[in-house]
């Protein structure tokens, strides 16, 4: 059914149409197990929110931010979980799954026999990853609004920010995957992802760390994502968020360019 409907809904031509054909292919191969994996990916940040944001938050109480504002701890943790969820959803599709299709399934070798080019495969896979990431973000924001951790209006802005976060990490994930040589290399990505999750202002403000470590934390992509979404959900958007947006846009563009060029070298030899 999905395969029959998508070509009718997506009638444009050129680069966008050829990229959409990659999305159509992925949609046509969905299995029940895929939805179970998606559900598990969504539940993880929700469990963190309730166990740490609400559970530990009852011991921590209200948190005073560096700008002097006081918010409840759950409202501090929730946007970080949203950013981490957008990161995890994008990286899951653009690292492990992307590498499997390119290196072992040899799927892209067959696709390149058609008019689709490497950069269009990258765009299609990124669009597919964003579908998963956006579902995570939308569902998590519903929970945040239901728990009165933000308002419905601010949640819309946070959703747009989560989409940007997904694009940034999706581009980064595909670029890194083109350098992976074996499955063991993904242990490095998993370790880096977990380190980002712990040390990106997710559970404590970056200002709580020693000055040297603080600057390292604030230079990471997940911190910039958390900072952007937290400012939106708490209604404290300022000029710093422009830095966050530019940072994520550059990460997305550079990642996509690197992925497209690397795929061209690897697949068109």
Image (spheres, rainbow, N blue to C red):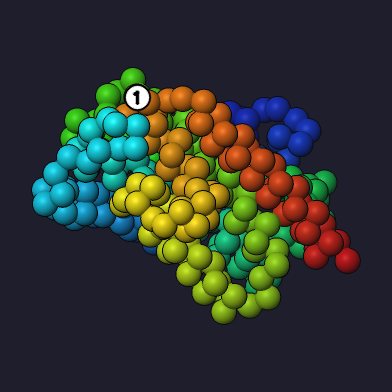
Q: Residue at x 19, y 30 (%)?
A: 148
**Label 1 crowding class (10 Å Cα cut-off): few <14, some 14-19, many 20+?**
few
Q: Nearer the viewer, residue 86 or 23?
A: 86
Q: Please tell me whether residue 252 is drawn above or below residue 185 in the rendered image.
A: above
Residue 88: give x, y in percent of width and height: 45, 54
The number of discs equals: 1
Q: Is residue 104 left or right of residue 239?
A: right
Do we see residue 208 in this rendering? yes
* Quarter of the image with the C terminus in it: bottom right
Residue 87: give x, y in percent of width and height: 47, 50
Per the image, label 1 sits on a secondary structure element best described as loop
Toward the top, the furthest residue is 153
Q: Please tell me whether residue 76 is drawn above or below residue 233 in the rendered image.
A: below
Q: Residue at x 38, y 47 (%)?
A: 207
Toward the left, the furthest residue is 58
Q: Nearer the viewer, residue 142 or 63?
A: 63
Q: Residue at x 51, y 26 (%)?
A: 239
Q: Please tell me whether residue 194 is drawn above or below residue 181 in the rendered image.
A: above
Q: Residue at x 65, y 61 (%)?
A: 176
Do we see residue 135 in this rendering? no
Q: Is residue 183 left or right of residue 259?
A: left
Residue 58: give x, y in percent of width and height: 11, 48
Query: Dividing the picture into quarters, in which one does residue 38 lie?
Result: bottom left
For mark 1, what is the residue? 235
Toward the right, the furthest residue is 269
Query: Dividing the picture into quarters, in which one does residue 267 lie?
Result: bottom right
Residue 107: give x, y in percent of width and height: 69, 62
Q: Is residue 102 left or right of residue 73?
A: right
Q: Nearer the viewer, residue 86 or 210?
A: 210
């Amino acid at each position: 059914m999905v395969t029959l409907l998508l070509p009718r809904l997506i009638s444009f031509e050129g680069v966008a149409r050829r990229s959409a054909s990659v999305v159509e292919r992925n949609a046509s191969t969905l299995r029940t197990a895929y939805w179970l994996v998606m559900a598990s990916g969504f539940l993880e940040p929700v469990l963190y929110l309730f166990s740490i944001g609400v559970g530990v938050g009852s011991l921590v109480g209200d948190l005073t931010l560096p700008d002097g504002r006081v918010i409840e701890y759950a409202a501090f943790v929730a946007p970080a979980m949203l950013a981490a969820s957008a990161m995890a959803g994008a990286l899951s599709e653009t690292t492990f799954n992307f590498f499997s299709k390119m290196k072992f399934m040899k799927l892209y070798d067959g696709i390149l026999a058609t008019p689709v080019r490497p950069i269009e495969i990258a765009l299609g896979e990124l669009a597919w990853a964003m579908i998963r990431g956006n579902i995570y973000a939308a569902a998590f924001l519903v929970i945040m609004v239901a728990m009165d951790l933000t308002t419905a209006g601010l949640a819309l802005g946070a959703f747009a920010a989560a989409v940007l976060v997904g694009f940034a990490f999706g581009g980064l994930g595909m670029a890194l995957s083109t350098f992976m040589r074996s499955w063991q290399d993904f242990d490095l990505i998993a370790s880096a992802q977990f380190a980002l999750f712990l040390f990106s202002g997710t559970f404590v403000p970056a200002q709580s760390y020693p000055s040297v470590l603080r600057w390292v934390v604030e230079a990471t992509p997940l911190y910039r994502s958390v900072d952007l979404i937290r400012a939106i959900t708490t209604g404290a958007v300022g000029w710093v968020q422009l830095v966050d947006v530019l940072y994520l846009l550059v990460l997305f563009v550079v990642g996509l360019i690197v992925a497209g060029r690397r795929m061209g070298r690897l697949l068109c030899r």
